[in-house]
Amino acid sequence: MQAPLIGGHPAVDFLNTSFTPEGEVIETIGDGRSLLNWFVGAGLLDEFAAAKLSKRFGAKAVDTTASEARKLREWAKEWLLRWRAKPNGDYTDELGYLNKLLARGTSRHEVIESERGLSLVERPNIDSPDALLTLIAMQLAALITETPPSLVKSCAGHKCSLWFVDRTKAHRRMFCSASACGNRAKVAAFRQRQKEE
């Protein structure tokens, strides 16, 4: 199963690679191939680069990286829960760990043409399977430095564990999806009102 890409930010979509619809845990990065597929779906790698990395590093090495990514995800979930609850807390240890991951990475610069003209972009060098974790760390770093903690939310749906960035104007979004969890909540509320009447 593919991870839902509804978080509004690649770091949040990474947190959603393990989720519990209706209370049943679903793991979407069980192996290296599924991790590379997630990178492609999240727009962090293209299909050609993912296939090239898989061939270059081998399935066993990428599977090991997937295992490390799952550990990183659980660590990030625990930390971000605390960060949301207490934005000004002391996160020296967490930032130290994140910076260690970031320090593993190297990058190159490239000039590209786009509709807006020429621009200078930074591209990560993925010279080892561990460098994939650096890509994730870069997204986590971008999330905590660019997004207020109050806008990183968990779905209010019954037994739903999905996260999202609330980009609505009034910042009152409660559900991962209006058509799924939001609709189920409306139906449940309607049934409850009918029972009470």
Image: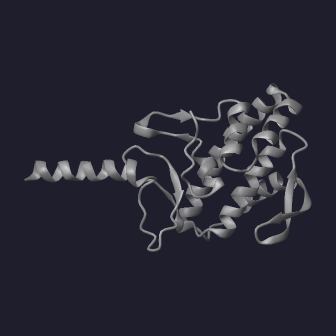
Instruction: Identify the coloring.
Output: one colour
Decide: is 126 above or below 156.
above
The total of numbered circles placed on residues is 0
> Which quadrant is home to the N terminus?
top right
Compare residues 98 and 138 and report the one nearer the observer. 138
Q: Residue at x 15, y 53 (%)?
A: 193
**Residue drawn at x 73%, y 62% as measured from the top left:** 92
Seen at 82% across and 42% down, the residue is 49
- Whether residue 181 is visible to the viewer of this picture, yes or no, is yes
In percent of width and height, residue 146 lies at 66, 69
Task: Give the x, y percent position of residue 115.
Answer: 76, 68
Residue 91 visible in image: no
- Extreme residue in the top direction: 60
Q: Is residue 157 left or right of residue 126?
A: left
Residue shown at the point (65%, 54%) measured from the top left: 11
To which quarter of the image does residue 4 belong? top right
Q: From the top left corner, tell me how far across and down residue 41 is, in percent.
A: 66, 45
Q: Which residue is at the far bottom? A: 170
The residue lying furthest to the front in this view is 115
Q: Residue 18: x and y, percent?
A: 57, 40
Specify whether 56 is left or right of 47.
Answer: right
Left or right, 149 with respect to 91, comes to: left
